[in-house]
Image (cartoon, rainbow, N blue to C red):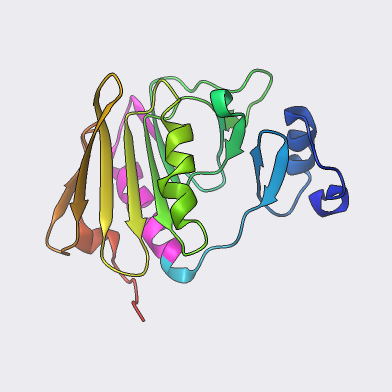
């Protein structure tokens, strides 16, 4: 559906949301521009499923886990996107007038792809940091064993930790949750 409207250069958020509801593909909205989101690889999906499944199984109230088809609105940057994994604490806050667009993630995880690695690590992280409820960001490499963890310590300070051994355990700081890298990378086949 959106492909038919590609001739237009600027879309309002309402126009985008209307087009997105009727689209078979997922698109990201960045301040009036609509971009097609590429599909994932089997490794990308395995990692996202392993991580989100473990979170969903371990976390109880007041936490809720969401995966790739859940929209996130970032008002200060005017971005609507679909993070690979999100956790919300407490009651969902939704974009006004919508039932399908979250605005209050506590933790976001992205599985890095060659085409999105720089965007996820730079511009997207900058955008996510404008969300008041956002406290932790996990980046998971799908091509090698490597996980990056960023967690907010106070104000505008963030702490960085990286993991690159299957025997290591990733302990989230914003949520009572731990997972080994072996579990994150379960069934992942590196070339």
Would residue 181 be found to the left or right of residue 68 on screen?
left
Residue 100 picture location, percent across and down: 62, 32
Predominant SS of the magenta segment:
helix
- The image quarter in which residue 172 lies: top left
Indicate yes or no whether the magenta region holds residue 50: yes
In the image, residue 57 sits, relative to residue 184, either above or below, namely above
- Magenta residues (range): 44-66
- Asked whether the viewer can see residue 66, the reply is no
Residue at (44% x, 56% y) in the render = 117
| Outermost left residue | 167
Residue 11 picture location, percent across and down: 79, 35
Picture quarter with the C terminus: bottom left
Indicate yes or no whether the magenta region holds residue 121: no
| Outermost bottom residue | 191
Would residue 4 be found to the left or right of residue 51 on screen?
right
Report the front residue among 94 and 3.
3
Residue 149 picture location, percent across and down: 26, 44
Report the front residue among 158 and 36.
158
Residue 87 picture location, percent across and down: 39, 35
Residue at (49% x, 49% y) in the render = 119
Report the front residue among 127 and 138.
127
Report the front residue among 155 and 141.
155
Residue at (64% x, 38% y) in the render = 30
Residue at (38% x, 21% y) in the render = 90
- The image quarter in which residue 24 lies: bottom right
- The image quarter in which residue 71 lies: top right
In the image, residue 144 sits, relative to residue 171, either above or below, namely below
- Asked whether the viewer can see residue 110, the reply is yes
């Amino acid at each position: 559906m959106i492909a038919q409207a590609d001739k237009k250069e600027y879309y309002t958020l309402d126009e985008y949301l209307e087009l997105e509801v009727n689209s078979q593909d997922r698109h990201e909205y960045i301040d009036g521009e609509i971009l097609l989101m590429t599909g994932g690889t089997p490794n990308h999906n395995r990692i996202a499923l392993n991580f989100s499944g473990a979170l969903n199984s371990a976390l109880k109230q007041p936490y809720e886990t969401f995966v790739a088809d859940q929209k996130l609105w970032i008002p200060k940057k005017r971005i609507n996107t679909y993070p690979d994994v999100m956790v919300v604490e407490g009651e969902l806050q939704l974009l006004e007038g919508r039932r399908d667009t979250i605005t209050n993630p506590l933790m976001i995880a992205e599985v890095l792809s060659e085409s999105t690695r720089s965007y996820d690590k730079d511009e997207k992280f900058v955008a996510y940091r404008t969300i008041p409820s956002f406290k932790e960001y996990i980046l998971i490499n799908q091509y090698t064993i490597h996980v990056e963890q960023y967690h907010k310590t106070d104000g505008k300070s963030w702490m960085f930790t990286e993991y690159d051994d299957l025997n290591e355990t990733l302990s989230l700081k914003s949520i009572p949750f731990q997972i080994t890298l072996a579990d994150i990378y379960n069934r992942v086949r590196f070339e």
